[in-house]
Image: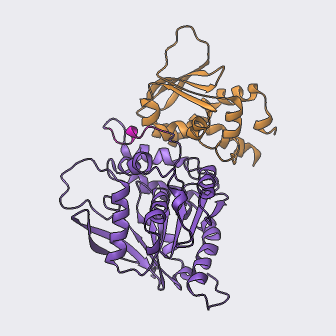
Amino acid sequence: MNGTIEPMVGRYVHVEIDGAMHRIYFEENGAGIPLVCLHTAGSDGRQWRHLLADEEFAKNFRIIAFDMPWHGKSNPPANWRGEEYQLTTARYTQTIRAFCGALKLDKPVVMGCSIGGRIVLNLAIDHAAEFRALVGLEAADFQAPWYDTTWLNRPDVHGGEICAALVSGLIAPQSPQASRMETLWGYKQGGPGVFKGDLYFYRVDGDLRGRVEAIDTKVCPLYLLTGEYDFSCTPEDTKRTAAAIGGARVEIMEQLGHFPMSENPEQFRRYIAPVLGEILTQSIPTRQGVHV
Amino acid sequence: MTPLSDAPDAAVIKAFAEIPALLERTPALVVRGRFLDCDCLLGPMGRPFHVSIRAGRITDLTQAPVLMRSWRFSYRATPAAWAEYWQALPKPGWHDLLALTKRGEAVLEGDLHPFMAHLQYFKDLLALPRLDAATVSS
C-alpha cells in the first residue's frame, strides 16, 4: 500500500515576544523568496496547506505558514497563568517581525488574511522597508461590526460551535463542501476565548482609519484582494481602503468569501498566481517571461 | 418554476409553512437541535410565524398575530430578503442570516441566547426552502 506524503515540513522555532519565549510552530515548503502567510482570527496555519503544497509556487518561493501563539500547535507562552488572551496591534506586529527575524528571512513577502490582512496594512505603514511586498486578503482599514463578540466565550454557549457557525456565512456558496467543512473545523478547534481575543485587535485596537494614507507603495508594493461574498470585510471596505493608498493594487475575487485560501483553493489560485508572478518578476528584473 | 425573487409575499409565506415538513425530512438537522426547546418568532417582517421547537422538531407553526403568544427571540426579514436567501446561489450579502441583519434587511430581537447557542441550526433550518427549491429544479 502506497501513501502520499505532502511536501511541506513542520518545525518549531523559539522566539522572544514581549519579553517571553514562545514556541512557535511553522510549516514550510519551497525555495526562493520568503513568503510568510498569516492565518485568520481564531484559526491556524492549516488554512494555507494548499498554497504550501503548490509545486509551481514552491519553485520560486519559500512558503512559510506559522501558528500564532495560542493557535494551532503554538501553545501560550510558559509564563501564561490563565489571563484573558488579547491580541494588540503592537503584539501582533512584534510577533511577525520576531518570527521573520528568528528565521533570518531576507525581505520576505507577507500575505495575511482577515486580521492578517489588517496587520499587513500596519506593516506597510510602520515597517515597509523590511518587506519585499505585502498582500492583504480580506483587508481594510476598518469594517463595521456585525455581532457582539461576548457570545464567543461564555460557559452557556459552546465556543467551537458558535465560532464556526458565525463564520460559516462568510464562506461563498460556491465553495466545495469539503473545503467549507475543513475551514469551519479550524474554528471548532480553537482554544476558549482565542477568537474573541484576536478580535480585540480587529475591532478595538487595530482601527487604521486615517493612517493608511501614509503607506508608500514605492517602498513596498501592496496588493489587496477580497472575496465578493465577504460581508465582514466587504469589497467596498477594501476598495475604500485602497483608494486612500497611492499605488495600491486591488482585486475583488469572484465566488470567494472571507477564507479564499482554504474555502476554495483552486479559485483562489487564479487570483494569487498573477500577484506572486508579478512579485517574482519585480524581484528578478533581468528574468523574462516568468510564470508561476 | 417561478423564480422566488419574482414571487409575491404569498410565496414566501407558503415556503415558510413548508419548513416543518422539510425539517422532518432532514434528520441530521433535528439531531443538531436535539437540546433545543424554544418558542420563537420567525419569518417575513409583517406576518411572521410563531414557531414552537421541542427537541429540535417544530411542534407548532402558526402565523401571527396570535393573541398574547410569547416568544423568546424573533428573526424577521423582508420578503425580498427571504426570496434572495432561498436562491440556489444567493447574491453576495444576501446569502447568510447575519449578512441580512448587517445590511438592514432583517431584524434580530429578544433574548438571543437560544438563537446564538443554536446558530448553525437556525441558519440551516431557515435555508431549507433553498435546498427544496434546488431539489425541485434539478
- Residue B113 showing in the rendered view: yes
Q: Position of residue B31 (x, y in %)?
A: 46, 39
Residue for point 39% across, 38% down? A151
Residue A2 versus residue A138 in the image, above or below: below
Q: Residue furthest front?
A: A214
Residue for point 62% across, 78% down? A278
Image quadrant where one finds the C terminus of chain A: bottom right
Does the magenta segment cover residue A183? no
Colour that chain B carries in the picture: orange
Q: Position of residue B77 (x, y in %)?
A: 63, 29
Does the magenta segment cover residue A151? yes
Q: As rendered, which of B68 and A284 lies closer to the eye?
A: A284
Q: As rendered, which of A212 and A237 lies closer to the eye?
A: A212
In screen coordinates, is A47 left or right of A13? right
Q: Position of residue B121 (x, y in %)?
A: 50, 38
Colour that chain A carries in the picture: purple
Residue A198 versus residue B127 in the image, above or below: below
Magenta range is A147-154
Q: Position of residue A272 (x, y in %)?
A: 60, 70
In screen coordinates, is A195 left or right of A79? right
Residue for point 57% across, 28% down? B107
Callout count: 0
- Residue A175 showing in the rendered view: no
Image quadrant where one finds the N terminus of chain A: bottom left
Residue A204 versus residue A95 in the image, above or below: above
Residue B106 versus residue B52 in the image, above or below: below
Residue for point 76% across, 37% down? B5
